[in-house]
Image (spheres, rainbow, N blue to C red):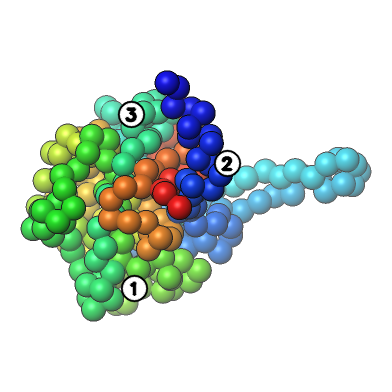
Amino acid sequence: MSLIPSLLGALGSGSLRIVDLTNTLQASTPVLRLPEPFENLIDFSLETVSEYDKPGPFWKHANIHTGEHIGTHIDAPVHWISGRDGHDVASIPPARLFGPAAVLDFSAEAEADNDFLLDVHHVEAWEAEHGAFEPGTWLLLRTGWDRYADSQEAFINADENGSHTPGFTAECAEWLAGREELSGVGVETVGIDAGRGAELDPPFPMHYHLLGADKYGITSLQHLEQLPPKGAAIVVAPLPIVGGTGSPARVFALLDA
């Protein structure tokens, strides 16, 4: 029996629900700010070319100006030196962009400590309760950080010592990179590494280990509180940019209504 009619029927009847996990993309979307001497990407902006006027009397259209890693976006392996010989965005196998969603809720811990780091024992405890990861799983870390997604200052949460946002320990990053069941990791923060990730060994260990192991990262996710710990599916839809190290992406979850 074909599965497609069943899927379409479930969508049409409302028995299968779609949750948009994507932050809106606009000039005010919070972005990472690298300190000097590093160069930053340009922010997102629209340049109107015509708007039902002389340059285009019947249509409105615009040019898009943006960096690759702005808003809700995917990190491809070539984004990091450890994955420099790996996939660009356009060559990521489509099957790796679909998969089961494992939602690890550590929002209480992140609220108590903005520098909270997920460790191996946290993941092992989750698996003991909910079952092992299935093939193709995307691990989604819920920290409640999406509540800051409309404020550059709160989202980055920086002081004189740097940014304070939750993430993963170096040990957990290496361990997750070695988990064959995982396709990638998704977070609600501006990057897949913690705000203090530069201080770990290696610096930015999620980027180093995950992208070096042909896995992918998704950032700035929204609405993870609507997903169960297990049972939802995730769909990641980036632009197929040839040579792209990342791309803004639309990310959806499918779950029983």
Please indicate whether residue 203 sits to the left or right of residue 65 in the image.
left
* Upstream in sequence: badge 1 or badge 3: 3
Say which residue label 1 marks: 158
| Residue 235 against residue 114 in the figure, above or below | above
Which of label 3 and label 2 is nearer to you? Answer: 2
Task: Identify the residue at image location x=28%, y=76%.
Answer: 111
* Upstream in sequence: badge 3 or badge 2: 2
Cα gap from disc 1 to disc 3, whole angstroms: 32 Å
Task: Identify the residue at image location x=22%, y=38%.
Answer: 134
Cα gap from disc 2 to disc 1, whole angstroms: 45 Å
Task: Identify the residue at image location x=50%, y=68%.
Answer: 150
Is 19 in front, or is 159?
19
Q: Amino acid at mark 2?
A: Gly
Secondary element at tag 3: loop
- Tag on residue 87? 3
Which of label 2 and label 1 is nearer to you? Answer: 2
| Residue 58 against residue 196 in the figure, above or below | above
Q: Can residue 211 be seen?
A: no
> What x and y, as percent, mark residue 122?
13, 59
Q: Amino acid at mark 3?
A: His
Secondary element at tag 2: helix
Q: Can residue 164 be seen?
A: yes
Badge 1 crowding class, 10 Å Cα cut-off, few under 14, some 14 to 19, many 20 or more, is: some
Say which residue label 2 marks: 12
| Residue 196 against residue 139 in the figure, above or below | below
CB contact under 8 Å: marks 3 and 2: no
Is 217 in front, or is 233?
233
* Upstream in sequence: badge 2 or badge 1: 2
Please indicate whether residue 182 sits to the left or right of residue 31 in the image.
left
Is 20 in front, or is 63?
20
